[in-house]
């Protein structure tokens, strides 16, 4: 089939080239529309239900909201995990589904159960809502609105009702989260004493305001030819409207107005978060969130375009300042990818020209780089694969051009061998036909071998497609992309290349490289030296493998190298009792410290959450985003780790009241999504009693302090929130005739207030809130608030309720229907897996002595590494076994397959040595490098074995064949190996953003190819000679055995004919004797000794 395809491509060369051109155009279109991001989105399929219930403490949130929702979610199909957070005023329950579950189906399942949960949650305790359809990497653009002329309330109002709506209407944006400023409210602050004087309750005020703030419709009337709609309007439009609301009527008929018993004003709502920038004060911030599945680069471009349009319409004095732009990170990583690819392509072309000695041939081979990549983008779009650092950055151009190199090498060799045949032709037409015949024969001769080689390379990437979870989302698209590009390259080498070559080489190139003559002569000397010292070289090869394995035992391990994002995220934790205003002041002090670093461009800090309750973050938690200058402008530190260490030291020196950890924005979000924490490693402790959980966590933290590499160690704070607890005294309530709802209404109005409607200002709408005019921080004033009895009199609140200051939970975390606490730590200066192993040994005694009902679980990035390692350990041997059997089928002998596989340990050893020399730990990208270099090694072993088999078929002895095969395969093997290594050099030495992921992969391939090339060029002939001699010896023994059996059978037949009567059972004693023969080893004599073969 392959032969027919090549011949048809040359015969219909014009059609093939036109089709190639059309496919290239389609590929260019798809490449332009390819979804682009910096790194793969590893977010699992998860749906969150968030319930805002302002005023409730974490205990009430857990009891009345979180737990009922969790129980409703239990039993949903395809669910792998349920976790939740209960904080003051907010509940968040996250359901994680199995990979592959459709997000919209998952949301439908969750939404159906939420409807049932709403019936369980008490009225007035909040309504659960689904979070936006966004991934963990959905925060693509963050900016602040500042002004020297406008108040925080004006900034927040403009952001919420003007700017955010413009951004939200942008295609690809699902939501805009706002934080900071002051939310505008119409506030009715009632004096409780005046209520008592006029015998009014809070409930009556609520009812009056709700009833008076309505519009209604009365249908319509017809008047002559007109129809007129009847409309009744009573909505509040101003503060005066509110003040003039009659709440009751005195005995003399004079109405009591709201303005007489309350202050009515516009004021800020109770806030749960704030944001500051560059130590200059508060600003209003917003985050644009991208719809799942969108092209992040395109969405950011649209957002920036909309920002520029809005900027022109801003009120005088307002400014929009961006502090996080995902497209900058994407741009840096894309620059890394395309720079490395361009440099690799240039190096490959140069090597091709030097190695092949023909410019047009090298350029034709080089076309196997862009065209297959463009074809791959067609299928990437079809399969929904995003172009990023992993899917595009792992492509090796050396692998793409392997097939075409084999074709071109065969063609150039054919030109030299058949030069006389070509020159015999006198007519131009005959010469062109002769050249075409040479090209056809040359391509057909190696077509199957080229296809087989590419198939092997595709097979070695097969294990990556079996990965699951985070590692699957990270590396499976890369494996698919490489397989698509290799498949397209194979098709190119079998169709487009022969068709184009038949046009470009109508005048054959009879090139003979003197450089290769010199290299070949040097190689002959080395090969002669090695063949004369076979045992020494064999021992040297084994020694290299053993040495590499010993070195490999010292390597650390990690899941994925940290990628330099260009920003630093400072995770902030403070005491739960810290006020939000104090946090603002501390944040500004921290910003001042960070701004002193010359590497820092800007610092934006946030505490708490926006009023929309999209994030379950308390006012004691926050994050500072530190934007950095390019690395070449750094002066304080040489790398990111050193800079983060110095920053942390300075912050703790001047701002000691915070627990901080430094990481990177995307890294933080990914860790939080996967393990529920932003730290590198977490110990999750499960149980029911929060106090016991805290004590156990403290024991783990003490042990971890002594483990090398620990950084930013902290225990999750679940206790320590001060509460003003107003607990009803039911005996006193019964004695005075006070209803519980009256007490609870009073508590609600202390600070938060009761929302009784909306006040409209055009299309803007603001909450109308009723609360008491009292200083809630003064417990004595709270105790003296009058509460109505059933007789119409009042009693102080302190007589019917116990009011005290207590400590309660700051947050309640749950996972798998159990409460949990986490011990969190980052790692610096050490590999991840080694740290976890040592930490688990250090804490083993604590785990053994856990109380009944309590258990632990370790989480973080090392879980992904362990899972990927276990999966690859199972799948890689299967893939290698498949390749081995393919080699057996192709060569018809197990000995050839064994000989080819000898190169693999050498290549792997070289990769290990490379990692050790460069100080890189083993990671999954390094594992991908080992897979790739194993494929390259097998491929070149196949080239040698094929050449060897050809030499034997020509009649050469084994000794001569292994020698000649080494010489004849030197050029194609060296060319492919050098190109494979050269293609990875830019990745190995790059220091640009994102190169951290490519560096281990490139290092393994380069060093693996070098070691495999140096040793296999001598060791492979030695091993193949031994294996073939062994095979020949066994064949001789089998042949001798067959001849002996044939002679014995002949003798038996003659014996039977000569003694027919004796062995006839009818003539003798009934049973004929059975003649048994045994093979006896032939005596070793001078005649049957095997002669030694000499190399000619």
Image (tube, helix red, strand yellow):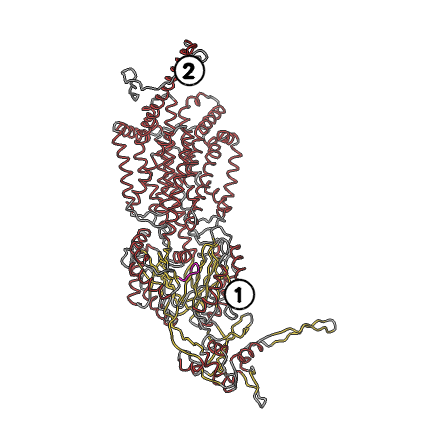
Q: Which residues are magenta?
A: 815-819
Foreground of the two, 999 or 198: 198
Q: Quick check: 1029 above or below 677?
A: above
N-terminal-most mark, 2 or 1: 1
Q: What x and y, as percent, mark residue 206?
A: 53, 78
Figure quadrant of residue 725:
bottom left
Residue 557 vs residue 438: left or right?
left
Which residue in the protein does label 1 denote?
A: 118
| The disc label shown at residue 1072, or none | 2
Q: Is residue 1000 visible?
A: yes
Quarter occupied by the C terminus: top left
Query: Residue 732 at what x, y percent from top left?
Result: 45, 81
Q: Residue at x 30, y 65 (%)?
A: 652
Which one is in front, 143 or 76? Answer: 76
For label 2, the crowd category at 10 Å Cα-Cα, with few meaning under 14, some 14 to 19 and many 20 or more, is few
Rendered location of residue 291, percent (x, y): 50, 57
Relative depth, front residue between 736 and 179: 736
Q: Residue furthest right?
A: 224
Q: Secondary structure at mark 1?
A: helix
Mark 1: few/some/many CA within 10 Å (<14, 14-19, 20+)? some
């Amino acid at each position: 089939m392959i032969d027919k395809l090549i011949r048809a491509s040359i015969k219909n060369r014009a059609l093939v080239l036109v089709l190639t051109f059309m496919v290239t155009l389609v590929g260019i279109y798809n490449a332009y529309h390819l979804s682009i991001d910096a790194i793969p989105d590893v977010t699992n399929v998860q749906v969150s239900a968030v319930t805002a219930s302002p005023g409730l403490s974490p205990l009430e949130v857990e009891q009345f909201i979180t737990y009922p929702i969790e129980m409703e979610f239990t039993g949903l199909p395809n669910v792998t995990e349920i976790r939740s957070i209960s904080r003051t005023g907010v509940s968040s329950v996250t359901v994680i589904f199995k990979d592959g579950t459709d997000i919209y189906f998952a949301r439908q399942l969750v939404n159906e159960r939420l409807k049932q949960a709403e019936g369980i949650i008490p009225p007035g305790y909040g309504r659960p809502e689904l979070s936006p359809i966004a991934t963990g990497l959905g925060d693509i653009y963050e900016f602040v609105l500042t002004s020297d002329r406008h108040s925080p309330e004006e900034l927040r109002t403009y952001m919420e009702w003007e700017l955010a709506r413009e951004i939200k209407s942008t295609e690809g944006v699902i939501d805009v989260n706002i934080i900071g400023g002051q939310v505008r409210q119409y506030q009715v602050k009632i004096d409780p004493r005046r209520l008592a004087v006029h015998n009014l309750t809070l409930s009556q005020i609520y009812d009056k305001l709700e009833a008076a703030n309505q519009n209604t419709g009365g249908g319509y009337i017809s008047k002559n030819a007109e129809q007129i709609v009847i409309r009744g309007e009573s909505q509040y439009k101003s503060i005066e409207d509110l003040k003039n609301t009659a709440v009751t009527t005195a005995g003399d008929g004079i109405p009591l107005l709201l303005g007489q018993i309350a202050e009515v004003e516009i004021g800020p709502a109770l806030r749960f978060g704030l944001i500051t920038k560059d130590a200059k004060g508060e600003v209003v911030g917003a985050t644009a969130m991208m719809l799942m599945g969108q092209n992040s680069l395109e969405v950011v471009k649209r957002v920036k375009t909309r920002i520029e349009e809005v900027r022109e319409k801003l009120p005088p004095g307002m400014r929009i300042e961006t502090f996080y732009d995902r497209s900058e990170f994407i741009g840096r990583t894309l620059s890394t990818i395309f720079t490395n690819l361009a440099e690799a392509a240039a190096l490959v072309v140069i090597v091709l020209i030097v190695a092949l000695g023909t410019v047009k041939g090298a350029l034709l081979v080089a076309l196997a780089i862009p065209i297959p990549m463009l074809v791959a983008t067609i299928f990437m779009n079809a399969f929904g694969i995003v172009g990023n650092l992993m899917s595009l950055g792992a492509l090796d151009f050396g692998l793409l051009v392997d097939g075409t190199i084999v074709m071109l090498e065969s063609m150039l060799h054919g030109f030299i061998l058949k030069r006389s045949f070509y020159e015999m032709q006198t007519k131009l037409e005959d010469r062109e036909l002769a050249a075409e015949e040479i090209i056809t024969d040359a391509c057909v001769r190696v077509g199957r071998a080229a296809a087989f080689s590419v198939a092997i390379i595709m097979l070695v990437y097969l294990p990556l497609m079996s990965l699951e979870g985070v590692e699957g989302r990270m590396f499976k698209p890369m494996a698919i992309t490489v397989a698509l590009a290799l498949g397209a390259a194979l098709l190119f080498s079998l169709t487009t290349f022969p068709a184009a070559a038949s046009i470009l080489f109508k005048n054959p190139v009879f090139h003979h490289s003197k450089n290769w003559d010199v290299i070949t002569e040097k190689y002959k000397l080395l090969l002669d030296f090695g063949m004369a010292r076979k045992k020494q070289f064999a021992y040297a090869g084994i020694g290299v493998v053993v040495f590499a394995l010993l070195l490999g035992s010292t390597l650390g391990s990690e899941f994925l190298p940290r990628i330099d994002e260009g920003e630093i995220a400072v995770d902030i934790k403070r005491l739960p009792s810290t006020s939000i205003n104090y946090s603002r002041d501390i944040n500004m002090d921290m910003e001042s410290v960070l701004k002193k670093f010359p590497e820092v461009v800007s610092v934006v800090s946030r505490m708490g959450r926006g009023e929309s309750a999209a994030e379950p973050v308390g006012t004691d938690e926050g994050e500072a985003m530190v934007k950095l200058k390019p690395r070449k402008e750094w002066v304080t530190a040489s790398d990111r780790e050193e800079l983060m260490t110095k920053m942390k030291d300075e912050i703790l020196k001047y701002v000691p009241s915070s627990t901080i950890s430094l990481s990177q924005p995307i890294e933080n979000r990914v860790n939080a999504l996967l393990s529920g924490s932003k730290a590198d490693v977490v110990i999750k402790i499960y149980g029911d009693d929060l106090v016991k959980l805290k004590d156990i966590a403290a024991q783990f933290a003490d042990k971890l302090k002594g483990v090398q590499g620990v950084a930013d160690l902290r225990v999750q704070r679940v206790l320590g929130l001060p509460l003003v607890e107003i607990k009803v005294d039911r005996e006193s309530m019964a004695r005075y005739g006070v209803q519980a709802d009256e007490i609870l209404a009073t508590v609600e109005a202390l600070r938060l207030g009761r929302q009784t409607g909306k006040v409209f200002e055009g299309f803007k709408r603001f909450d109308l809130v009723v609360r008491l005019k009292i200083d809630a921080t003064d417990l004595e004033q709270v105790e003296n608030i009058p509460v109505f009895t059933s007789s119409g009199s009042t009693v102080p609140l302190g007589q019917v309720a116990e009011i005290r200051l207590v400590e309660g939970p700051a947050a309640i975390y749950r996972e798998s229907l159990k409460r949990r606490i986490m011990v969190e730590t980052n790692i610096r200066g050490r590999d991840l897996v080694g740290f976890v192993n040592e930490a688990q040994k250090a804490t083993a005694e604590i785990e053994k002595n856990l109380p009944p009902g309590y258990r632990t679980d370790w989480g973080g990035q090392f879980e992904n590494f362990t899972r990927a390692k276990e999966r690859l350990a199972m799948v890689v041997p299967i893939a290698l076994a498949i390749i081995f059997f393919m080699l057996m089928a192709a060569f018809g002998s197990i000995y050839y397959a064994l000989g080819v596989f000898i190169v693999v340990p050498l290549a792997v050893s070289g990769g290990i040595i490379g990692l050790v020399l460069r100080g890189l730990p083993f990671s999954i990208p390094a594992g991908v490098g080992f897979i790739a270099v194993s494929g390259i090694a097998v491929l070149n072993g196949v080239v040698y074995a094929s050449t060897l088999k050809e030499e034997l078929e020509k009649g050469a002895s084994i000794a001569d064949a292994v020698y000649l095969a080494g010489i004849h395969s030197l050029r194609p093997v060296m060319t492919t190996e050098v190109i494979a290594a050269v293609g990875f050099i830019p990745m190995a030495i790059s220091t640009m953003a994102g190169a951290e992921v490519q560096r281990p992969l490139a290092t393994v391939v380069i060093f693996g190819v070098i070691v495999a090339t140096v040793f296999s060029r001598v060791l492979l002939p030695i091993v193949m000679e031994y294996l073939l001699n062994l095979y020949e010896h066994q064949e001789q023994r089998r042949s001798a055995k067959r001849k002996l059996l044939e002679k014995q059978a002949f003798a038996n037949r003659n014996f039977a004919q000569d003694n027919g009567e004796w062995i006839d059972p009818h003539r003798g004693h009934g049973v004929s004797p059975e003649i048994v023969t045994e093979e006896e080893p032939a005596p070793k004599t001078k005649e049957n000794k095997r002669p030694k073969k000499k190399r000619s």
